[in-house]
Image (cartoon, rainbow, N blue to C red):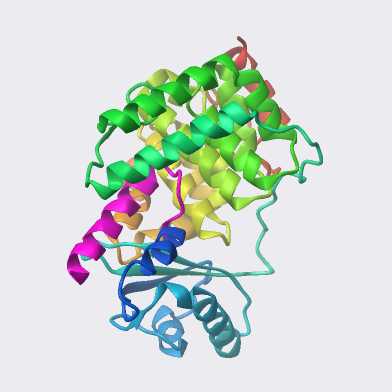
Amino acid sequence: MIQTELDVLRDVSVRLESVGILIVFAILTATATAFSQEQSFTIGAIDFFGHGGLDVDRLRAALPLHEGEKVSPESKEKIVALVTQAIKRATGREVGDVALTCCDERGRLLIYIGLRDESARQTAYNTAPRGSTRLSPTAIKIYRDVERALSNAISKGVLGEDDSQGYALSVDPEARARQLALHEYATRNAKSVRRVLASTRDVEQRQIAAEILGYADRSRQQIRALIRASHDVDSGVRNNAIRALVVLARSSREASAIIPGECFIDLLNSVIWTDRNKSIALLAVLSTERDARLLACLREQALTSLVEMARWSYAGHADNARLIIKVLTTQKKTSVSSRSGPRTGRRSCPTRKACNLPAVLSSRREEFQE
């Protein structure tokens, strides 16, 4: 039965990458109670980011756990503590993130370790909101209905979805119906959802608001709010907002054309794995348009991070970086400041680190007008 259980969990991770209603390791932990007490998961790969040229093989050797060993979902906190201590002893560097995520093509656990570099420019996030606005009980109920329906679909092995409308629709009839109800609610109440996303101090409310806003009818106000939320102080809000932008960008060239990709480059250098995972997915979509300014900014600001990610063991997480590097290598190298044009202008890469850059948004004023 172990292989079957791992297959289910691997399929869950595919659903989570595209929909994101649940958290991968939370599912591992919750599901473990239904398995035997001896249930464990094999480590498929351990990779690093933010290591600044340190010997990766040396880093792996210093760890108290290794590829091929088994761990239990309940041991996550212990794993994080042991890894953090081992890296500190071996390098003197602080660990910014230890991400345990499911799964590779063989159902094995993947571990990503981010190292802090105090000398590097740090990713800056929005100031934490302090408001008390909340989503309505109706919004929460519809959201939870979607959550339950997707969970049921996953348990049945029904995982396909359609993103062509700019929001995820499951091929499972029940889940699709619930998602369409969420779309209807989000479209009718987009203004109040945007208000919660921007202003409430309640982190879970902002996380849910980011998910719901992704189901609204596409508009410049929606995209602008999601861009701002992509630099929320909470990593879960950022994750949900960027994932919504990924679906929007994939759905149409019109949507991708008004998403300023240069605002997300600093997240490629983040010490948080979900920042890198989601921003690289968005930038992989946007870079296919071969916008000269975006490609130049990627080359100038994030090439080291792109190379780090392209070297990750699991292709499912490395391929977006590989795609961007391929685009960069086939694009004539030019300086940002040396170009002009209707799309890129004479602007340099953004120097401020928040994605709700007034300068960037105002420079595309005509694209964000309703």
Q: Residue at x 43, y 62 (%)?
A: 30
Q: Is residue 318 visible?
A: yes
Q: Nearer the viewer, residue 175 or 221?
A: 175
Residue 252 vs residue 116: left or right? left
Q: Main secondary structure of the magenta part?
A: helix
Q: Residue at x 52, y 42 (%)?
A: 240
Q: Nearer the viewer, residue 96 or 198?
A: 198
Magenta segment boundaries in residue numbering: 1-24
Q: Is residue 324 visible?
A: no
Vertical placement of 259 versus 368: above or below? below
Q: Nearer the viewer, residue 294 or 28?
A: 28
| Residue 278, horizontal then vertical, whole percent | 46, 47
| Residue 253, horizontal then vertical, whole percent | 38, 21
**Residue 197, magenta (yes or no):** no
Q: Residue at x 32, y 52 (%)?
A: 12
Vertical placement of 340 versus 86: above or below? above
State which quarter of the image contains the C terminus. top right
| Residue 40, horizontal then vertical, whole percent | 32, 77
